[in-house]
Image (spheres, rainbow, N blue to C red):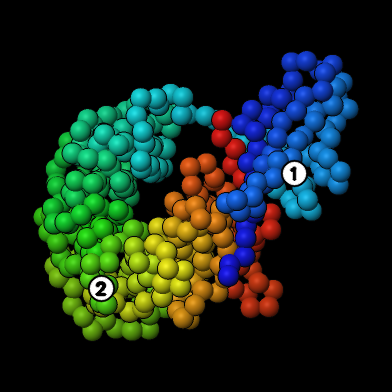
């Protein structure tokens, strides 16, 4: 059974309570600790009048550490709360956003996909640059910038992938072949080739210039096992030691040494060599729950983080695929939506209202990456 990463939620307007319009009166806000699905403990924070501090209850503390960071010590456990530095959501009303990506080439840009199939391209100040109405016939489920920042690719419930110009919103290519909702996209190198995943159980390798499917990957044991998430990595060790014995087609660019990891509806995780087209590893469905999201450790490509439908967060070592090296419940019973790993940090989105940041540290004995789970950073949204 996995360990628990205990999650807490703080009253959305607690900063306004702290500042207070009536300094001569005591004021209150709450912090709820979610022990599990059936147990939520409320802690009342009392902001004492006339600047006399905060009463967090016997043995508890609450303190402001910096302009956007607060620490609560409750029942012997530490929680860190990060508040918003800038709220851009108020300027983007009128749609439900289902996918997002960002890139910085000369300047920062954002792209958003909606439930209605529309695409918005925004500048660094969240001003609208380009809007593509009805880009797809259904909800946009995944969207990515190409590395140049001048084009993007979107996937949808309508089973199609489309390439778009960021500048004028034109659609030079449409990639057709999937038989169910497209769930994820991975771009290889500069973007001549892309990979797409679908609930039809396939991962397709495309050549964008001709809109051609070069190869279709499936899980060997169950080709129809839907794919929720994919992530790629480069096996630099293998690339430096081995001379490829396979010949790529003239439509492949930069696939040598590349691997794609797939998280399946069954909970199984598979690894495929993009160049040789072979399935090389299969991780078992230990939690009998769908694998919703994957992230690669940017410093140790053999380590993979997987988020599951039942709230499990697992760390896998691809060199020892029999069982995970570590596992935690985040909001047990509530789906993990997405994971993102950058530097020594893992970002986790869980359910409708939980986003947290976990540090990745080194185990003193083995030096392998390890999730520091005792003090999560929790993001606060208004």
Is disc 2 surrounded by few (<14), some (14 to 19) or many (20+) residues within 10 Å?
few
Identify whether 42 is placed above or below 77.
above
Among numbered discs 2 and 1, the one appearing first in the sequence: 1
Residue 319 visible within the image: no
Q: Which residue is mark 2?
A: 222
Residue 289 visible within the image: yes
User: What is the residue that sits farthest to the front in this orientation?
Assistant: 38
Residue 238 screen position, x and y as percent: 38, 80
Q: Name the mark on residue 72.
A: 1
Q: Quick one: quadrant of the N terminus?
A: bottom right
SS under mark 1: strand
Q: Residue at x 57, y 48 (%)?
A: 356
Give the left or right position of residue 346, taking residue 253 as reference.
Answer: right
Along the line of sight, the residue nearer the viewer: 75 or 212: 75
Give the left or right position of residue 62, taking residue 330 as reference.
Answer: right
Residue 207 screen position, x and y as percent: 17, 59
Q: Quick one: quadrant of the C terminus?
A: top right
Along the line of sight, the residue nearer the viewer: 132 or 291: 291
């Amino acid at each position: 059974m996995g360990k628990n990463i205990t999650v807490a939620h703080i009253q959305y307007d607690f900063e306004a309570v702290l500042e207070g319009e009536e300094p001569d009166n005591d004021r209150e806000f709450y912090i709820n600790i979610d022990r599990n699905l059936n147990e939520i403990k409320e802690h009342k924070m009392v902001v004492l009048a006339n600047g006399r501090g905060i009463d967090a209850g016997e043995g508890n503390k609450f303190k402001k550490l910096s302009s956007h960071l607060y620490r609560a010590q409750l029942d012997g456990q530490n929680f860190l709360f990060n508040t918003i530095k800038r709220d851009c959501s108020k300027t983007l009303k009128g749609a439900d956003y289902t996918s997002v990506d960002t890139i910085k080439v000369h300047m920062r840009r954002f792209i958003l996909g909606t439930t209605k199939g529309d695409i918005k391209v925004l500048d660094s100040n969240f001003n609208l640059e380009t809007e593509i109405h009805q880009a797809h016939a259904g909800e946009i489920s995944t969207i990515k910038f190409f590395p140049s920042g001048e084009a993007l690719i979107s996937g949808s419930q309508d089973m199609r992938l489309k390439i778009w110009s960021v500048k004028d919103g034109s659609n030079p290519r449409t990639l057709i072949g999937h038989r169910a909702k497209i769930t994820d996209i991975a771009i290889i190198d500069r973007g001549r080739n892309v990979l797409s995943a679908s609930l039809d159980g396939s991962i397709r390798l495309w050549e964008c210039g001709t809109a051609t499917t070069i190869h279709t990957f499936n899980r060997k044991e169950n080709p129809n096992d839907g794919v929720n998430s994919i992530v790629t990595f480069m096996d630099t060790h293998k690339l430096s030691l081995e001379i490829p014995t396979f010949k790529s087609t003239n439509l492949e660019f930069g696939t040598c040494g590349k691997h794609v990891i797939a998280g399946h509806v069954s909970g199984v995780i598979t690894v495929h060599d993009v160049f040789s087209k072979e399935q090389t590893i299969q991780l078992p469905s230990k939690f009998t729950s769908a694998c919703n999201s994957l992230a690669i450790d940017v410093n140790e490509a053999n380590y993979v983080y997987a988020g599951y439908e039942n709230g499990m967060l697992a760390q896998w070592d691809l060199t020892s695929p029999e069982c995970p090296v570590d596992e935690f419940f985040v909001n047990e019973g509530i789906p993990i939506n997405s994971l993102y790993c950058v530097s020594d940090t893992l970002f986790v989105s869980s359910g409708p209202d939980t986003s947290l940041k976990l540090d990745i540290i080194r185990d003193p004995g083995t030096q392998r990456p390890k999730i520091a789970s005792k003090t999560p950073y929790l993001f606060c949204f208004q």
